Amino acid sequence: MRYGYFDDLHAEYVIERPDTPMSWINYLGTADYCGIISNHAAGYAFYRSAKTGRLLRFRFNSIPMDRPGRYIYIRDNTDGDYWSATWQPVGKSLDRYRTVCRHGMGYTRFTTEYADIKTDYRVFVPIDRPLELWEIEVENLSDRERDLSLFTYAEWCFWRMDQDLSNFQYILYTCRMGYEDGIIDYTLRWPGGEEDKGFMVSVLPVESFDTDREVFIGDYRHEGNPIAVERGSCACSIAIGGNACGALQNRFTLAPGEKKYALFIVGIGDARTVGRAMLERYRDRVKVEEDFARLGEYWRERLGKYRCVTPSPLVNTMVNVWNQYQCHTTFNWSRSASFNEAGGRDGLGYRDTNQDTLGVVHAIPHLVRNKLIDLLKGQLAEGYAMHSVQPLTWTQGPENVPPPEGIFSDDHLWLLLSVPAYIKETGDFAFLEERVPFADRDEATVYEHLRRALDFSWTKRGPHGLLLGLAADWNDCLNLTGKGESIWSSFLYHRALGEFVELAQRCGNEADARLYEERQREIKARLDEYAWDGEWFIRGYLDSGRKLGGRESEQAKIFINSQTWAVISGAADPEKGRLAMDSLWKYLATEHGVVKNWPAYRTTDTEIGAITSFPPGLKENAAIFCHTNTWAVIAECLLGRGDRAFALYLSFLPAAKNDRAELYTMEPYVYSQFITGKEHPYHFGRARNSWLTGTASWAFVAVSQYILGIRPDYDGLVIDPSIPPEWEGFEVTRVYRGKTFHIKVRNPKGVSRGVAELLVNGKILPGNLIPHGAMAAANEVEAVLG
Amino acid sequence: MRYGYFDDLHAEYVIERPDTPMSWINYLGTADYCGIISNHAAGYAFYRSAKTGRLLRFRFNSIPMDRPGRYIYIRDNTDGDYWSATWQPVGKSLDRYRTVCRHGMGYTRFTTEYADIKTDYRVFVPIDRPLELWEIEVENLSDRERDLSLFTYAEWCFWRMDQDLSNFQYILYTCRMGYEDGIIDYTLRWPGGEEDKGFMVSVLPVESFDTDREVFIGDYRHEGNPIAVERGSCACSIAIGGNACGALQNRFTLAPGEKKYALFIVGIGDARTVGRAMLERYRDRVKVEEDFARLGEYWRERLGKYRCVTPSPLVNTMVNVWNQYQCHTTFNWSRSASFNEAGGRDGLGYRDTNQDTLGVVHAIPHLVRNKLIDLLKGQLAEGYAMHSVQPLTWTQGPENVPPPEGIFSDDHLWLLLSVPAYIKETGDFAFLEERVPFADRDEATVYEHLRRALDFSWTKRGPHGLLLGLAADWNDCLNLTGKGESIWSSFLYHRALGEFVELAQRCGNEADARLYEERQREIKARLDEYAWDGEWFIRGYLDSGRKLGGRESEQAKIFINSQTWAVISGAADPEKGRLAMDSLWKYLATEHGVVKNWPAYRTTDTEIGAITSFPPGLKENAAIFCHTNTWAVIAECLLGRGDRAFALYLSFLPAAKNDRAELYTMEPYVYSQFITGKEHPYHFGRARNSWLTGTASWAFVAVSQYILGIRPDYDGLVIDPSIPPEWEGFEVTRVYRGKTFHIKVRNPKGVSRGVAELLVNGKILPGNLIPHGAMAAANEVEAVLG
């Protein structure tokens, strides 16, 4: 069953059936203002921080689902019938109500027909203003004059979401609404805080308004049948205390065939100054169109740095539009706000944000550089990192030192992937010499930051010489106590050491290169001795000495991450790497992706951690955690097994679920955090927690740098595809260090991997690297596999 | 407009119109299990702690209001029509749906008629088991056989409310529901936590069930139209992750005139053991009736210790039933959970709980004694108190020391009212010698605890020799900075010193008596010098030296608390006390009660505090804060102005608002925290935040000990009424130290105050005190005013 399709021409996902099994959402806003909007126009908005800057309210996990939002009601004043410009909240019968929702790049648009009235409702946030524009065009398709009203509706949120959710004896006595000249003024006061303000504006004349939620909705009613809309006019209520809403009525007649354009603006700022100025500005529809065009330009520019044409439409859609769009969304909003992340966890997750940079560094290296500095400022002088950094309020000091039980095994090590990725992309070696403060005290060069990260981990090794698990490794729910060691962290460490050695060499720091190479050899020796289990790599050692994820384990005999990272880290012997990935394929891979571990935990084990508390097949316990699946793709590419890499890629690709949406349930256009695993008794194949996942960046890395194989490196651009042998070729257009590359890959012999011929601007080059010296401003590249 | 009436015979409030302007709620449970239930059966339940033991979920401040709860749907399987045993959530048209809700003592009952089917639905919590019983009797009033189904519905809550409200990426993956033999098993697992469990049982055979909320309700539906009820059967869903619900279907036919009794049980414990045992126990309806009878006995016993018959039915209803019931509710549940208190603030508010004891000490002195010990354990060795104490998890230690900015001016001083009140009621002087630990270190006698409270305040005096305001005084929103001083705290301190002096004398500690008497004189001298403003007492001095609440103040020229406590404290000269209360009457009293200050603050003043941030007429800023109104009543009684005392008492009495419920909006049977003040532009007279307010205990003290004037004291029972002169008399029955007093007061001369004749068991006594020596086991008392 499908609910929609990809419109690649317009970079839209088009939802034709509104009754999706879950809310399918989109993100509006690119700078300080973020709006989240579902296919029913539900959702919230915040300014700068989802935690402390919440402007529009949303009821999470509620019944009815998906309320409230940015509603526009249409009322026929002749017969009193009313509906909404989106199917919900009024929810008219779908045999008389036709609607299409288009989620685009930074905007969402709803076209609807009901009762011979057509509406075209579009919401977007300009790239440089903290406000959202609600445009609606209403057309009379009938042959008689129509007397119509429009009613907007949104709920204002107390700015601090934790207060808004629970402190009703307080928040309900803070608002002081106002109304003047078509502008609703949302003001509240709190002790000691700045006076935050919001506004809602109508460009057409206002017939009536409400600012008190209970007055607009009415007792024992809901957004589906508000009393004001039923009655045909608002009550001009001014909320002083209570729940604040914004509701504005326009009223007009339409001759047969006539169209009317209405515009409403919701934003941050003082109603009398900013609200009035915005009303003046956007009275001119040309300004709206200009801002919409600039938004399109913004996204075209960002997404245009890497484009492909492959035999797989799914790959083309995801790579060119949705996967990159999701990467920018996670990067912009730091994974803090969605319909399942309520926004209470603010700031930058340390490992999350490091990884999020990988998916956008080719497009916005300058912004990645800033973000890396934010992250480096979250590193302690001892080398480990704060698990979460708050750049908006960061100041150096001992208060940033986490308690010992709050130190993670891997957080700081991700810097050894994100910083090198930035330098490979840009060549900006000077960045390594930039001095950046630590979170608690002192400052040092970026290079020194990286070194301290490695030195910290060197001091945190356990009885087998492998890295201690500490609070957790990448898997938040593996909480190995005491002397518990993480094989996975040790693989990451091996890779991190390798990255540093290469940097040290390139910086001419030979002594460093030798020292950390020695450490890398030592870690590899420990891994060789203690990590292999015969058919696969184990996941760690518990405090008691028991193996985690080995043949003799009673539960969770095999884990995904130690197989994939054995290969990715470069630590595994090639034969063991292949065997390990074969075991992954045999025990963990399913039609919906690779489960995290098998068999699922069924009893709690406090030596292992929270993973053992989840039901089998959910979250960390034997679900298909999509983030980890991307590493399986990369590992198979590194092994040169492009067919298997692509099969794994497709298995968890959301676009591949489009026609099984009743099972998958979440958005087919973006990755979810996990897909329910095979050991769940009911929901194998059902996705949950969409949008805010490290899957986005790693999936983009996997497909763009490993399957398609266009990979930036210090010395140039590497062309190293690992594709299904049946692909006859593909094309990629990529910007690299300001130069353009149009790359045609041909595969006449039906192989998976191996560049046999490389032509750059008509010249044959050896190997598969385009060195800087061979690059022009614009480059035509042809690579033949074989 | 009225929605219901008081049925004093059954101690019930009867709601005849279900569409009340707000949720009108009741509390179920007397020990570890608390349920809150509205007049639509909405509400939640928790075990021990509203914060960490939440069993049933409720959506606060939501649209639709008042959901979910303890729903029972009735479906006619012949025509598919369905409704609920309470008006909401299905909300049938009120011209065809007749319903009455009766809130009683620890139970709520709904009788409903629709489609010739009558249902009688009663919910209660037995006094000694952590579970609730949902009984329903269904009667066929028609002349044809009816094929009916019942469906129960409740949502299980993740135990920790803060997680349940916001951490969806976690809580939705924890539940593991089960079903067996008519019993739904609510189990979830979390790392490191005990496995908490709940169950739902049907005594009648189960036709179908659901445990997955989304399956029962259906997408884009709500509690008003669940798909399972519409379809006529549940889907036997087992939620493993997701939102857990409990839904059980019974199905039966009823011949004309036939009745059927069904029972459902929701409770805490393992389904297979506790659930099964409860099913076995309550299969026998006699057990249900026994438990209901014991519940009635519990409340009759508690409320029966003080009963009155006065010329005012309002007084009789409130004193004999609702005011006392509210006092026990605030005492039992520590003001932590209601429909506007979401339950996130757990434990005992220090000053709140001290005051809450005053309203119940006559009925349950042994429980008050335990609570006082809990409070004394929250006092620091230095004498001040933790602002909130957590008896469930209390352990002594330095972690209990609040930061300096968390020390309040008054918290600890309330011990000087609560402990003496307990001893006056019981004569238990030995309590003063009991050794109790402090919160941080050491232990001492209760007497020493009291002394340290006084000594701490002595060190916290400001430039005028008056008590510093510290974080706040009783008014949480008066946050006087730096050297700011609170006149009100100084009055309280004067009273507290007086109470201690009397205790010291009675304990033979003459040196103490002299020392603290000297301090009391010193405080009185400072108050005489600095507190009087000509017509009234000011409220304090700000850090800058400005007066707070004086003639020259730009805003808030006069406050209620300094007038009332000038009298209550005994510190004011009688003439100034009268003048002050006259000013209160002139500037602050309104038809809906006495506002807290006048004029309201309209601009923020950080030297004064949060009070200046609320809109005029709401909360602390010029609202009718009911708690403070009780003190006005007491002060007028102390001045002997019974007519004015009674007028003030009536002005904010909820029962007196019964016929103006459309304005008052909250429950007419219990006090609310505040009534909107006269300076609010729209809602003067509208109440908010019902049930959990110190108003309950102090209103009971005011009416029972001051208006009716039956007041326990060390040497006996004082008879000192201050009544409206037109009252010809009244009667009170009261238990005091295990003895019964039937007191008839006659007022032949139409005075307000002054006992002219006192007969006890036929003997004339001098004055107005019944000394212990004159008391029999049962006493007939006659007092004649004049």
Image (cartoon, coloured by chain):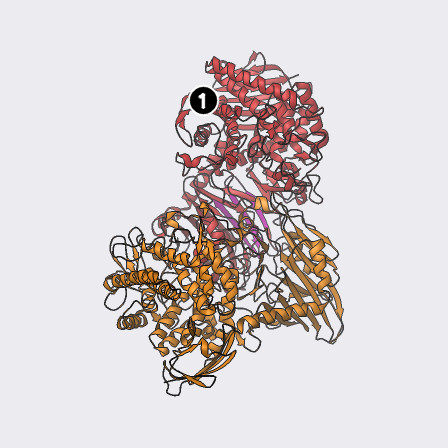
Chain colours: A red, B orange
Judging depth in this view, the residue of B711 and A434 nearest the camera is B711
Instruction: Say if A430 sits above or below A281 in the image.
Output: above
According to the picture, the residue beneath numbered tag 1 turns out to be A447
Tag count in the figure?
A: 1
Q: Viewer-proximal residue, B533 or A160? A: B533
Residue B602 in percent (x, y) is at 32, 58
- Considering only vertical position in the picture, is A575 above or below A661? above
Q: Position of residue B366 (x, y in %)?
A: 52, 64
Q: Position of residue A200 (x, y in %)?
A: 42, 52
The residue nearer to you, when weighing B80 against A195, is A195
Horizontal side, residue B617 vs residue A523: left or right = left
Determine if the magenta segment contains residue A118: yes
Specify the amino acid type for callout 1. Tyr
Secondary structure at numbered mark 1: helix
In the image, is B321 to the left or to the right of B721?
Answer: right
The magenta region covers A99-126
Name the residue located 58 percent from the left edge and 76 percent from the top edge: B10
Q: Position of residue B81 (x, y in %)?
A: 68, 65
Q: Is residue B535 visible?
A: yes
Residue A729 appears in the figure: no
Q: Is residue B358 magenta?
A: no
Chain of the residue that carries numbered disc 1 in the rendered image: A
